[in-house]
Amino acid sequence: MKLKDLTSPFYVWQRAFEKPYTQSKPTLNREGAHAYRGFHINDIEKCVGCGTCEEICMNNAIDMVEIAAKDSKKGDSGLVPRFDYGRCCWCALCVDICTTGSLRMSNEYTWAADDPDSFRFTPGVDETSWQDSEHGYRRHPEYDLLKLVRPEMEMLSPDEGLKSFDEVVAGYTHEQAVVEADRCIECEICVATCPANMDIPGYIRAVREENFEEGLRLLYDTNPFSATCGRICTHRCEDDCTISTFGKPLAIRWLKRYIVDQVPAERFAEILNDEITENGHHVSIVGAGPGGMSAAYYLRKKGYGVTVYEAGASGGGMLRYGVPSYRLPDDQLDKDIDYIVSLGVEVKYNTKIGHDIEFQQLMDKSDAIFIATGMDQPSSMRIKGEDHPRVLSGLTVLNDVASHKDPGVGKNVAVIGGGNVAMDAARVCRRLGADVTVLYRRRIVDMPADKDEIKEALEENCNFVLQAIPVLIEDAESSDQVTIQWGEAEMIAEDGKRPRPVLQEDRMHTDTYDSIISAIGQSGDFSFLPQEISDQLKQHWGKFEVDQRQRTAVGKIFIGGDIANDVADAISAIADGKNAAIGIDAFVSS
Amino acid sequence: MGYAGLQLVNTMFMQELCERMTRQFDCDQVMHQKDDLSFLRVDRDRLESALMYLKTHEGFVHLSFVTVIDYIEDGFFRLNYMLYNYDKATNIGVQVDITRENPSMHSIHHLWAQGWTYQRELKEMYGIDFPGSPRVDEEFVLEGWDGIPPMLREFDTAKFCEDRFAKRDGRESQDIKQTMRDNLYPERGES
């Protein structure tokens, strides 16, 4: 035995009096690394309840649940993710895919409890110590699971566009359409925003799977004007596309167009297979615009005999007379209307109710009536001199051009207004070779026109004069011209209300034009309604009051489209038409 | 030497090293991720000699780990051998791409004894073979596993969880579209 063997235990023992190298248990407050994937945090103000976190979770650890603090609204389901930490593996895919960036992680990682159910929790709602944590895993800013970039749409250059009335937007190529469709995460948030509640994720999936027959069927479930809407829809759905938080929203409108463009009109009947069993009832529809013709389509499918009365020489209403062909070519509108008519819908053109046939006659012979006459009466500017012969209405100019007549606007034109009719009138005048000045009383952001229309009008060199209020219209020196006096306006907000333009009388201008086109709004003409019926129908701000199924106070009468809804766009009219068909069917069957 | 000075020395060392490696081993990709972290990509058959050189001539004596990324769309695996140089306090990652059809790679257990452990794990999790690596076919952490290797991208984790684990009582998820319909447009849009 060596001496060392005897003494070494004492060396060891002396260590007993030194500070230990190990740490005592339990270890308290050891903070996780700053980018640690710890417990979840959700900013429920930002969360729109798209459920993408639930969808991507490989462990089925997430449920979407309703909470008291949040209601559903357009663009937000009101649901929030609830986690089951019995299943979560903290892979952070939910954080990486979160469309709004509301979901992230703290660096907190210790949680002890006796009750296993307490590990199911709703971040941002259930109180946790880590909700306000500064640290924890974040998505890397350059790393996106979502595809944020939209394929660029080929369009005629503004110079080329101005040379003709040819369609400006080329439409997607096959490759572009499939790439674009692949960006959709099918969260379904957009469905509630679409006035017609179209199955948008469904038809985008059909594009992705290149199944255009299925795509067409899905479109026609809710919208028989898909060739049209694929071009000129106001696409409110895209405003609420969850991809738009970080990227460009899905080009929902262009994808719809792509489906319809792939299917030749001759194949519609075979694909849609709309079998009709006559039910012996008859419905009269006033107006062959998108609202009236949609109602006709869905009523016909239910077996109703349908007669549509149209004052104009062809169908489509404002789509034909108000939307120029560079946005919506006539043949595309015809494609939609022809299919509806092919199902046996009778359309009486050049037939004005109250003139060619009395409204009471329709009341007598129909089981129900749907009125969707639209707003085709230009609103007055309410200024002196507006009845000057060189003052034209925007609708008249568009109507003339649609009917291949020369509206005679001259070479130097002022357009008054900031809505789609104003933009269309301005762009039409540019195509007719005129210099165009647009006078609008508010700012560009206040313009009710579609953003695309405003942008394209600017690109086509329409000169915008903003915050300009017309005051007086007078004879010019030449009888072929007209003079307008207008004043600059200041936007003034009073007690938190929307800013209002206020005329600055010290800053007045006088300009002379070949013509002035007034496009400040429209209203409906209801003079065809007999007084006793008119008295029973309630109106509010120039619109008829109807319920969710377009019912009115008069049992037989249903009303929809621009004269009933506040949105006054094609897709809302189409939705009204379909819902009127449901309402009429319920009314007639009862 | 201050931190900034050390950083500069590191950067220069790493840059020069990568140039030498590129010359000798024909690395087709060099990426300087941070001051003390660079990546090189070499051919499958040059890996051993590249690692040997880094270990014996450049001071990268420590094998930190071996990982793999599954590029299923492009049909290959990217192996990552992470080495550490204690003297320079720098890391280098040597990457090798191998095809998914033939998921097999030379073993490196003769260079670093712990290499066989990583290789056994990769065999189990991704099905990548390392012929000659000790105990490479033995179970690593999965006991009685009979499915496809679970870290492969084609493995359906969600389905596996659905089949294997019961949900806790009381769990219920609401459908987004139906909830919004019920709350926002209950009477509209029916057929």
Image (cartoon, rainbow, N blue to C red):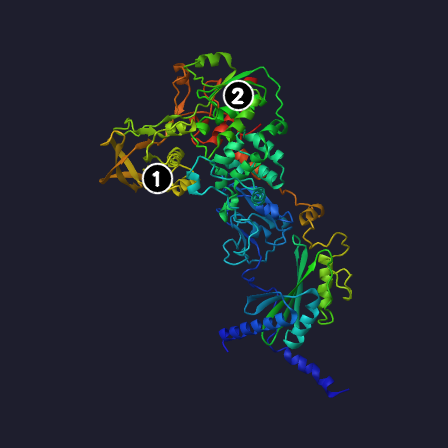
**Quick check: A468 left or right of B63?**
left
Circle 2 residue: A584
A309 or B33, which lies in front?
Answer: A309
The relative height of residue A489 versus residue A381 in the rendered view (above or below) is below
Q: CA distance from mark 2 to mark 1?
A: 39 Å
Question: Within 10 angstroms of label 1, few (less than 14), some, or many (20 or more) residues?
Answer: few
Q: Secondary structure at mark 1?
A: loop
Give percent across and percent down for residue A67.
Answer: 53, 42
Q: State the residue at coordinates (64%, 77%).
A: A16
Residue of label 1: A498
Decide if residue A73 is in sight here: no
Residue B56 visible in this rendered orientation of the protein: yes
Identify residue type, mark 1.
Arg
Q: Position of residue A66 (x, y in %)?
A: 55, 41
Q: Amino acid at mark 2?
A: Ile
Residue shown at the point (71%, 71%) measured from the top left: B112
Please state which of residues A139 and A259 is positioned toward the viewer in this rendering. Answer: A259
Q: State the residue at coordinates (41%, 18%).
A: A536
- Front residue of A132/A538: it is A538
